[in-house]
Image (spheres, rainbow, N blue to C red):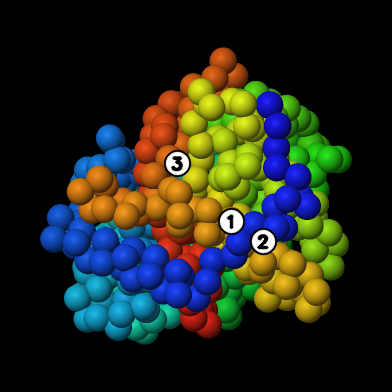
Amino acid sequence: MSYIKLEELKKRPEISGCETEQALGFAVEQVRRNLPEFTEKFQKAYSENNVYQPTENVDWTTGFWTGEIWLAYEYSHDEAFRAAGEIQMKSFLDRIERKIDVDHHDMGFLYSPSCVAGYKLTGSEIGRKAAIKAADQLITRFHPVGNFIQAWGPMDEPENYRLIIDCLLNLPLLYWASQETGDGKYRDIAEKHIHTALANVIREDYSTWHTFFFHMETGEPDHGATCQGYRDGSAWARGQAWGIYGTAVGYRYTQRTEYIELFKGVTRYFLEHLPDDLVPYWDLEFGDGDEDQPRDSSSASIAVCGMLEMAKYMEKEDAAYYTAIARKILKAVVDNYAVKDPAVSNGQVLHSTYSNHSPYNTCNHYGVDECNIWGDYFYMEALTRLHQNWEAYW
Ligand code: GLY
C-alpha cells in the first residue's frame, strides 16, 4: 500500500477556468433536471445504484440539496431556482418549529446552506427566522462542564458525552446568529467549542479523531474513538477533511493564529495520505494497493473548499500553495469522479462513502461507493469558489 509523494502531487495539472466553467455549468443543469422531483421533497443522504430517491425533510443532510439549489441560483440568476429555494426554506421553518429530527448538533449542516444562504441571497425573513431558531436549538446541546456541544443522543449520559470533528462546520451558524441578533451568547458557545474540539481531536501527528469523549463530572478530556472510520487510531478520510475546513473556519471566526498551524498540519496529513489519483479512500489507512476499499470522493471536495477558504486569510506564498493544490485535487474529481451523463446518475459526484463496513465502525453502514448529498454540495461549492467571488454560506 502506498501514497502519492508531495513532490509528485505538485506536478499534477490544475483545473483551468474553462474546465471550471464547464463542470459548474453541467452541475447547475443537473440541479435543474432534478427540480420537478425535488422541490417539495429533498434528495436522500445517499444514492442507491447512483440514483437519489426523494425524502421528506428529515436526517442531517437535507440542507445540502437546498444548498445546491442556491449555488445554481447564484450561477444562473434563474428565478426557477429561487422559487424552489423559497419552498424549501418554508419546509425548514416548519421542521424547526415542529422540532422534527433536530435532537442532534447538525443544525449548521441543515440551516447554513439552506436558510442562511437563502437569507443572504434574497433577504428572506423565513430563512432568517428558521436559521435563528436552529441556532437556539443548537446551543441547547452545549455542556459548560467540558465546554463543548454534544453531538448525538440524549444529553447527560456518559456514552453520549462527546463531540465529533464534523461539528466545526455547524458553528458558523452560531456566529451568524450573533451577528444577526446582536446577542453574543451564540458566538461565545461556538468559540468555547472550537477551542475544546481543536485541543482534543487533533493528534500529535496531525491525524484526527472522529469523536472525543469527556468526563461527565469533571469535564476533563477522556478518550478519542471512531464511529465512521476504519478503526479508533486511524484517520477517517472525511473526518480529516472536516478538520481541514473546520480549522479554516475556526481561524476565520476567532483569528487565533495557532489555528493556522493546525490547518497546515491536518492538511499536510491529508495530502500525504492521498492515492495516486488524488481522491482518498474512505479511511486514510488505505492507499494505492487497497483497491478493494471504496473511495470517499466527498472528502476531496470538502478538503478543496477548506483550502480555498483558508487561502483567503494567508500570506501570498501560502495562499498560492494551497490554492494550487486545491485546483489539482478538484481537477481530479472533475475528470474522474464527476457525473458526466444524466442517464448514469441524478447526482453530481460518484464514488463517495457515507459509512463503510469495518470491524470497528460503530455507526450504521450505508451509502458506500455511491453519490452522497454533501459530496455533491461541496463539489459545487468548490467550483463556485473558483468561478466567482463567493460569499460563503458558512
Ligand atoms: N457529519 C457526518 C458525516 O460526515 O458523515
Lower sequence index among marks 1 and 3: 1
Helix, strand or loop under label 3: loop
Q: Amino acid at mark 1?
A: Ile
Residue at disc 3, CB closer than 8 Å to ligand 1: no
**Residue 288 appears in which quarter of the rendering?**
top right
Relative placement, left or right, of 189 versus 386 is right
- The single residue placed furthest to the top in the displayed view is 359
In percent of the image, x 26 and y 76: which residue is there? 82
Relative placement, left or right, of 31 versus 286 is left
Relative placement, left or right, of 191 versus 380 is right
Q: Amino acid at mark 2?
A: Ile
Return the residue at label 1. 329
In percent of the image, x 80 and y 63: which residue is there? 260
Q: Position of residue 206 (x, y in %)?
A: 79, 44
User: Could you say which disc has been placed on residue 352 in the image?
Assistant: 3
Helix, strand or loop under label 2: helix
Q: Is residue 29 visible?
A: yes
**Label 3: few (<14), some or many (≥20) within 10 Å?**
many
Return the residue at label 2. 325
